[in-house]
Amino acid sequence: MTTHPTRTALRLLFDFVGAIEVFNLSSIDTLNPVSPQAAAITRLFLGVLVILAVIFVLVSGLVVYAIVRYRERPGSSMPRQLAGSRKLEFLWTAVPIGLLATVFVFTAKTMRAANPKKGTRPADLLVVGHQWWWEVKYLKSGVITANEIHLPVGKAVLIQLEAADVIHDFWVPQLGRKIDAIPGHTNYLWLRADRPGVYSGICAEFCGTEHAWMRFEVVVQSPEEFTAWEQAQLKIPQPPSEPEALAGMKLFNELTCVNCHRLAGTRANQTAGPDLTHLAQRRMLAGGAAVNNPQTLAEWLKDPDRIKPGSNMPNFHLSDAQVRALVAYLETTK
Amino acid sequence: MYSKAKLAMALFIASEASFFALLIVAYVFYHGQPQNGPNAADSLDIPTTTFYSLCLFSSSATLWLSERNLRRGQYDRVIAWLVATIGLGAIFLYGQGREYLRLFHNDVTISRNLFGTTFFTLTGFHGLHVLVGLCALAVVAGLVLRGLVRERQAEAVEAVGMYWHFVDAVWVVIFGIVYLGSLV
Amino acid sequence: MKGHEFTEGIAGLVGERERVGWFSHEGLLGWVASVDHKQVGLMYIVAAFVFFGLGGIEALLMRIQLAVPNNHFLSPETFNALFTMHGTTMIFFVAMPLLTGFTVYLVPLMIGARDVAFPRLNAMSFWLTLFAGLMLYFSFFAGGAPSAGWFSYTPLSEAAFSLRSGQDYWILSLIVAGIGTVAGAINIIVTVVTLRAEGMTMKRLPLFVWMNFVNAFLMLFALPVLNAALVMLLIDRQLHAHFFTPASGGSALLWQHYFWAFGHPEVYIVILPAFGMISEIIPVFSRKPIFGYEFVAASTVAIAFLSFTVWAHHMFAVGLGHIANLFFAVASMSIAVPTGVKIFNWTATMYGGQLRFTTAMKFAVAFIVMFTIGGLSGVSFAVVPIDWQLTDTYYLVAHMHYVLFGGTVLASFAGIYYWFPKFSGRLLSERLGSWHFWLTFVGLNLTFFIQHILGMMGMPRRVFTYPALPYWAAFNMLSTIGAFVLLIAMLVFLYNVVMSLRYGETAGDNPWDAWTLEWATTSPPPVENFVRIPPIHGRRPLWDLAHPELADELGKVDA
């Protein structure tokens, strides 16, 4: 989170030089689709970009030509007072209409490909947007997690999208369209990834203080890996044996953690905050604000505002020993 | 040559119509949705409101008579019809006030549910416009009484008249949608 | 109205400041008490530039925060308040009053009138706008600025999620400004309809007047839509009603429909007067009449009608039905056609002309190219699937700034350089103007072009910070550098204005050899504008006087 300014500046410089030298399209998520839906949009986007670029070159070419050719020169005579041309007006009305009609045909075609109909089958996954994290529920297996969605490669998954408080927006650029999560209004979205990997997801609708750190990740795995992950998630953690972790478990139950969070096998069963059952397995913390490891988890518990200012996680002013105990406990609930 | 005052009033009315259209859309939108608590059908007193509505509608006629006499220069009648118009408008407002009190008594309020929210907002803004109209008419009556308005200033009076007719017309729509609409 | 009618009664006798009570004050009181359309217009413009400074500082603070990833320069709440204030300020208290200032100053002059139809109402519109702006900024001292965005989507802007009273100040401020705008729109329409000089038929109106006339109708119908929505939000917040609160049965989306039913016409409200300025400036510096006058005017009317049918293209991501999406895609694409007609006509005006690259002309020509970029990226948002990917990203931020900065701001600078001599009697420095222009041009493209790429990389808008993903830091830094180039450009402009007001070259009545009626009077014009109005037999009265052998024949169209 915190780096020395000189180092930041140096890295930026390198970044910038690097950007000029090796910048390639692979950094542009929307041009690197890994799902058929996103691929359809990318094809359309590139096609439209070409048309727009041609129009831009045409217009700016005409302007630049006029600037050079018709610049006032000493001794030039009075220009002809031409007031218009019906033929030209017709031309530059009709040609754009034709072009836009063509674009519209491809738009209409791509809309279905990019956003397949929901159909009649029940959703596989319930995703609920909260200020500022994502609740994820696998409706068949019952797995509950947060800010991280695991998918088996190549399988189409139907997501049911809701919101608990304000409007959010679910967007994984490499997997296709974004769609709003709206309180009181359910949306559905097909998600399918054709290549294993980790794809970043974003809340794309302004949703309050910590909108920036409402990121999530989609982890696409082979079917075997996915099943293994699902099985591991279903396991109910056993009370720890190690004394520090045990102390942490006691703290977890005594403090108000249980009023907001859920942790399978304990009395914590709330959804005001993210599920903590297998927290230690997750890649990121606090909606992407930090990489998840025992050290950042300790920093988070010590002072949440340092990592994600304004988040709903209160600062309990825990002692270092208490933090160590809680971290030890949460690390055992893998 | 157009009359500046009447043109300006016509434009103002167009913009007001756009404002009321949105309040009406909100009412109709939520009216079509299932909801808990009171609704138009079980809360509104249609017969009584019909009577008060007729008062408001007939005030448009009395105002028209007043305007006609202004062009003829018969100022006594102008004032008489203006007073009748103001009286009818005031009766309407009194009726609306009674309706509100009865609803409050039955715990139908703006914060109760969406019927309350949309009903009070829509009819409340209309009532506010009636009140403004009454003030404008009273000013006109005062000016006529003191002899400050004569035929050639009829335009300004007609502009106020246009506003009053508009306020009436809005009530025709509201009465139709909110009151009569609850019957179907 | 008494004072004004009195002045109307004494035709021909003009230029004596003390004659009428309204104009009798000198100094600051002379401005505050003024109902003269020129003074009101200038007050609009000056107020708009003060707010432009505030909105600009807000933008710079945001760009500093975004210069590096994971930055802690600003807290998220501060950042959110800044972009809310930046958007609200720039739209309602910069773009609208700036353009309105030009409108109320120039429309009466261009049609040969002494003032607007209702001078006192005109002054009231200005003071409502100014006080609305002050009320918005007062929120900083009254519990914190609003932070739900200039669009204030519900339920985020409802009492449950936006506790600060800043949100209420925001609502009240926009209601007050909206009332002022509607009053101003009525004034302009009545002025154009009733106060045109003899011979100034609708077919001879300068295009600037045409666009503002059409624009007034847009304001007349769009602003009440916003005000109705704002009133409902205020009732929700203050009286615990339920219009937009899903938790008690309200609809989160109804607000969006309402807001954009206003919001899209609003986009044209802040660009049509700019189109009007371009349509005056390019012909004058090309020494030719505008190409396709009727088509430029008619396309404005077409844009105005279409602008009320496209609102839901701001809502493609909410999951409307398939048919609704298709309808709004068609409507949004079709609005590109009349806009394109304008671009082509401006370009064609330059062909065969004798282009004089004054600073005003430089800004006007740059406007064509920059606005084309914004217009074209706008078309990509009408293509629904592209919108699904790129809406609410920096690609949209880039698009919108090419339209508003590359469009409205560049056109306004063209207008300032062009009409400043009329406003003040002195010319702005062309040398400093050239610096101002090139710095603006470079800064604008440096700041905003790269944002297209950032959006395509997946950077959402309205985030106070971002993770250090590949190239995000470098591109954001580039954009921040561009913002500071723009700052320098604006300082050069400010210096130019201050110096030119004191030492600028005297302008004379008609420094550009232009042909609309505002140039037929002194610079600045006297209280009632004209001593004598030249005969109007065509669209270019002063041209006809100067070049009787080349006088316009109405509707002359050549192949």
Image: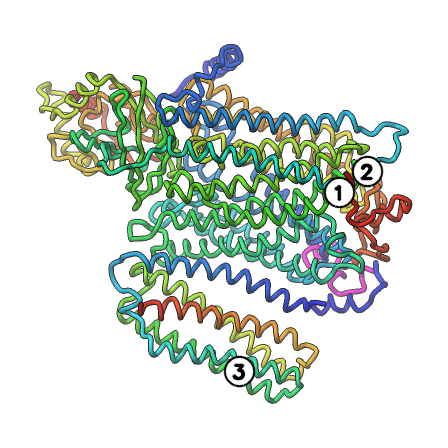
Q: Name the residue type under label 2.
A: Arg
- Residue assigned mark 2: C287
- Residue assigned mark 1: C420
Choose top left, top right, bottom left or bottom right for residue C533. bottom right
- Of residue C74 and residue B141, the one placed in the foreground of this image is B141
Secondary structure, mark 3, is: helix
Estimate the spatial distance between the alpha carbons at disc 3 and disc 1, rounded to whole Å.
54 Å
Residue at point 47% right, 62% down? B20
Label 1: few (<14), some or many (≥20) within 10 Å? many
User: Residue C258: where, in percent of width, then height?
Assistant: 45, 51
- Of residue C227 and residue C85, the one placed in the foreground of this image is C227
Q: Name the residue type under label 1.
A: Phe
Residue at point 55% right, 78% down? B138
Q: Is there any visible trace of residue C464 in the rendered image?
A: no
Based on the picture, tell me whether residue C29 belongs to the magenta stretch. Answer: yes
Task: Quarter of the image for the N terminus of chain A: give it.
Answer: top left
- Position of B17 relative to C401 (above/below): below
Subunit of label 1:
C
Q: Name the residue type under label 3.
A: Thr
Estimate the spatial distance between the alpha carbons at disc 2 and disc 3, rounded to whole Å.
61 Å
- Position of A91 relative to A240 (above/below): below
**What span is in magenta?**
C16-35
User: Residue A142: where, in percent of width, then height?
Assistant: 16, 31
- Position of C118 relative to A90 (above/below): below
- Residue assigned mark 3: B62
Q: Is there any visible trace of residue C405 in the rendered image?
A: yes
